[in-house]
Image (cartoon, coloured by chain):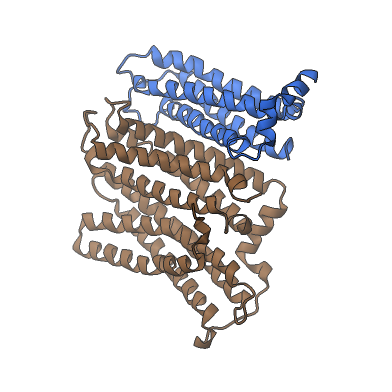
Chain colours: A brown, B blue
Amino acid sequence: MPSITSFNLAHVHLLLNHVPTIGSVVALGLLIVAFIRRDEGLKLVGLEVVFAIALLTLPAYMTGVAAFQKLRGQPGVSDTAIRLHQDVALFGFTWMEFAGFIAWVALWNARRHGRAARGLVVTATVLLIVAFAVMARAANLGGDIRHPELGGATATIDSAEFLASKINDVMVNSPWAWPASETVHFLGLSLSFGVLLAINLRILGAMKRVAFADVHRLLPWGMLGFGLNLITGMLFFVGQPKQYIDSAPFYWKIVFLMIAGANFLYLTVFRKAWADTRGVWTATGADKMMAFVSMFAWLAALYCGRMLPFIGHSF
Amino acid sequence: MGLLVWLESLPLSVWVHESPSVWAQPTVLTLHTMGMAVLVGASWMLDLRLLGISRGIPLSAFRWVFRAVAISLAVNLVTGVLLFMARATLWGTALPFLLKILLVVASAATLLPIRTYVLQSDPEQRDVSSRAKMLAMISIAAWAAAITAGRLLAYTVAG
C-alpha cells in the first residue's frame, strides 16, 4: 500500500486552502439569498455548507503545517511569514469551527422544530463572516510566503509571540497538560461512540419500536464528545506537529474523521427516518449501509489514532 | 512476586511484550481501547436515559446495552489480562494499577442493579425511580474515573 504521506501534502494544502475562503463566500451567498427570499430550505442548505466547510478546514490547516516543514529553510522563504500565516489561520480555524458548531446546532434544532431558529442562523452567519475575514487575512499572508514581490510586509515578530508557540510551550512543558488532554480525549471518544452506537443500532434494527426522533435527541451528546476531541486533538497537533505531519495513520485518521463527520451531518438531517414518529420506520438497505459506514469510520478513526505510535512514529 | 515473574515469562506474555508484530501489543491495546469505547459509551447512553435524556424511549428498549456491555467487557477482560501478563511484574506491584482495577470493578458493579431495574421495567415504562437516577449518576462518574485512572497509568507507572 503506498503511503498516504507520499502525496505532496503541500499540493494538497494549495487545493484545500481555498475551501475556507471561497467556501465561506458561497455559504454566505446562500444564507443571504435565503434571508432575502425567506427560503427556509435554502437556509438549511447554507447551514449544511457551513458545517462541511468547518470539517474541511481541519485538513486545510493540517496540510498547511505539513507544507511548512517542506518549505522551511528554502531560499527566499521567510520563516516569520509562514508562522504569521499559520497563526492567523489557527485563529481563522477556531472561528470556523465555532461557525460550524452553531450551524450544526441550528440544523439539529431545525430538524426537531421544522424550521431553523432565526437567532441560531444569524449567529452562524455572523461567526462565518468573522471566520471569513480572518481566513481572508490568512490567505493574504499565505500569498506573501511565495510572492513577496506583491508587496507583503515581512515584519519581524518574536516567534514566542505566536499562539501556536504558546500552545506548544504548554503542551510540552506542563507536566499535566498532555496527560489531562489525553484523558479528556478518551472520555470524549467514549461519549461519541456511545451515541453513534445507539443511533446506528436503531437504524440497523435494535430498538425497532423507538421513533427515530427519540434517538436523534442523543446527537448533541455525540457532538459534545466530538467537540471535546476536536479541541484536545488540536492541542496535540499544534503542541507537537512533528509527531503527526508525516505519519501515515494520522492522515488516514483525518480521512475517516471526514467520513464520520459527513455521516454525522447526514444523521442530523435524516429526513426519511424523521418522518416516522411512531417507531414504525424500517431502514432500507441503503440506510443500513450508511450505518455500517458510520460505525466503520468511527472504529477506523479510533484504530488509526491508537496505532499512531506503532504504525506511525509518534511518541 | 514469584507468580508475577512466572506469568511474565510465559511465551504468550513475551510475545505480546516483545514481538515487533503489529498483531502483538499494538493490536491488543487497540482492541482494549475499542472495547472501552463500546463499554463506556453504551453504559453512558443508558445512564443518560435514566437521568432523563430522550424521555420518549421506554427503558425496555435499552436491552441492547447489556449485550454490548457483555461483549465489550469480555473483549476487555481478555485483552486486559494479556496486557497485564506482558508486564506482570510492573502492573502487579503498582498501586495506581490496583486503583484502576477497583474503579473498573466498581463501575461494572453499578450495571448490575441498573440491569435488574431495566429488565424488570414494564415494556412501556418511561418513569425512572430516584434510586435508579442515583445509580446512573454513580455509573457515569465511576466510568469517567476508571478511564482517567487507566489513561494516567501510562504516565505514572509505565512512563
- The residue located at (53%, 68%) in the rendering is A88
Image location (x, y in percent) of residue B108: 55, 21
Q: Is residue A123 visible?
A: no
**From this viewpoint, which residue is outermost toward the right?**
B2
Horizontal side of residue B111 vs B103, given as left or right? left
Q: Residue B6 placed where, x, y %?
A: 76, 21
The N terminus of chain B, quarter of image: top right
- The quarter of the picture where residue A42 lies is bottom left
* Residue A26 visible in image: yes
- Residue shown at the point (39%, 23%) measured from the top left: B64
**Residue A32 drawn at (x, y percent):** 27, 65
Quadrant in which the C terminus of chain B is drawn:
top right
Q: Is residue A127 left or right of residue A309?
A: left
Q: How many marks?
A: 0
Which is nearer the eye, A39 or A145?
Answer: A145
Q: Quadrant of residue A176?
A: top right
In this orientation, which residue lies closer to the viewer: A88 or A305?
A: A305
The residue shown at (76%, 18%) is B3
* Residue drawn where x is 21% and y is 28% of the image: A280
The image shows residue A3 at horizontal and vertical percentages of 51, 55
Q: Is residue A87 above or below residue A260?
A: below
A120, above or below B98, in the image: below
Q: Is residue A313 above or below residue A92?
A: above
**Residue nearest the viewer, comparing B13 with A283:** B13
Please state if A275 lies on the left or on the right of B7 as rendered: left
